[in-house]
Every structure is written in structure tokens, then in C-alpha cells.
Amino acid sequence: MCGVDPNAPVGFVLGVDLLHISPLEGAVFLSNADITDPVTLKKIQELLPTERADVILSDMAPNATGIRELDHQKLINLCLTLLDLSQSILRPRGTILCKFWDGPEAHLLQNRLMERFQDVRTIKPQSSRKESAEIYYLAKLYNDGVKHQKH
């Protein structure tokens, strides 16, 4: 039962995926849903109990073509789309964790995040292979327009 233990965090988890997602207790999923489709945004807004999310976690990636620069650009574009969508669903002072593949367009995403968040950091998980281009931006304290320094 949610909320029984005052020391345990309580929240609402909403997953969105292009593919089918198997049910998981305590979470709501939009399977076969495209985050770039306005219909999906509307469904997300309807499902969020408080109309706005505290955190957006993105592990999305495009279907890889094997052409590194093209795959990198496609993922950066997905992240930029998510950032645009966050204006409608992320509460002030909210957080985004967004996966990207390192490459020449990463600075575009970083600059856009810095325009909207007070604290933007680059994170490479220890579990990630050293040679992997997979990195994350952790952007905290959503402020809708005030530019700040990167870390």
C-alpha cells in the first residue's frame, strides 16, 4: 500500500515507450507510444496526477543505423524534442536525466539545457564501458529561461 511508511518515498511512475512494456506494479505505462506525437503528450498530461512531473528520466535511443554521426544527431534531436515537451509537463525546479551519445552536436543539447536549468552536469555511469559514447546530462532546478553556468 503506497504511503503507509512515512520514511518511504511516494510517487507516481509513468513510463512511455515505442514498444510494448510489460506491466509493473506501482507504475503506469503508455506502450506503443511515440514521445514526439502530440497525442502522447496529451495522454501524459491526462495521466499525471498533479499535472506536472518532478523528474523526467530518458533512456530513449533511435534505431541505430551504424553510422555514428547520424545516430548521434538522431539521439540529440530526440533529446531536444523531450526538452521542448518538458515545458508542458515538468514542474518548476524539476529535473531531467537524458541519455545522449557523445559527438559534435552534444553542445547544442547542453546549451539548451543550460538555458532552462540552473545546474547541468555531464555524467558517465561507472557501469558504462569506457569506450562507449553513452553519456547522460543531469539537469536540475528547471527555471524556464534563466541562463546559468555548467559544471
Image (spheres, rainbow, N blue to C red):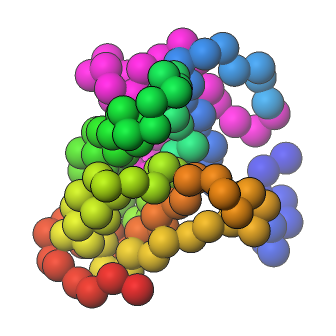
In x, y percent, where is residue 86?
A: 32, 48
Q: Residue 121: which quarter of the image?
A: bottom left
Q: Residue 25: which quarter of the image?
A: top right
Residue 78 visible? The answer is: no
Classify the position of the C terminus by image quarter: bottom left
Q: In the picture shown, does residue 49 fall above or below 93?
A: above
Q: Residue at x 40, y 28 (%)?
A: 35
Residue 84 as seen in the image, left or right of residue 95: left
Q: Residue at x 77, y 22 (%)?
A: 23
Residue 81 as seen in the image, left or right of residue 123: left
In x, y percent, where is residue 51?
A: 37, 45
In x, y percent, where is residue 77?
A: 30, 39
Q: Residue at x 31, y 55 (%)?
A: 104
In x, y percent, where is residue 49?
A: 48, 42
Q: Nearer the viewer, residue 112 or 30?
A: 112
Residue stretch rendered in magenta on the structure: 25-54
Residue 134 visible? The answer is: yes
Residue 26 is one of the magenta-drawn residues: yes
Q: Nearer the viewer, residue 103 or 32?
A: 103
Q: Nearer the viewer, residue 141 or 131?
A: 131
Residue 52 as seen in the image, left or right of residue 114: right
Residue 32 is one of the magenta-drawn residues: yes
Q: Residue at x 28, y 63 (%)?
A: 107
Q: In the picture shown, does residue 150 fall above or below 23?
A: below
- Number of callouts in the render? 0
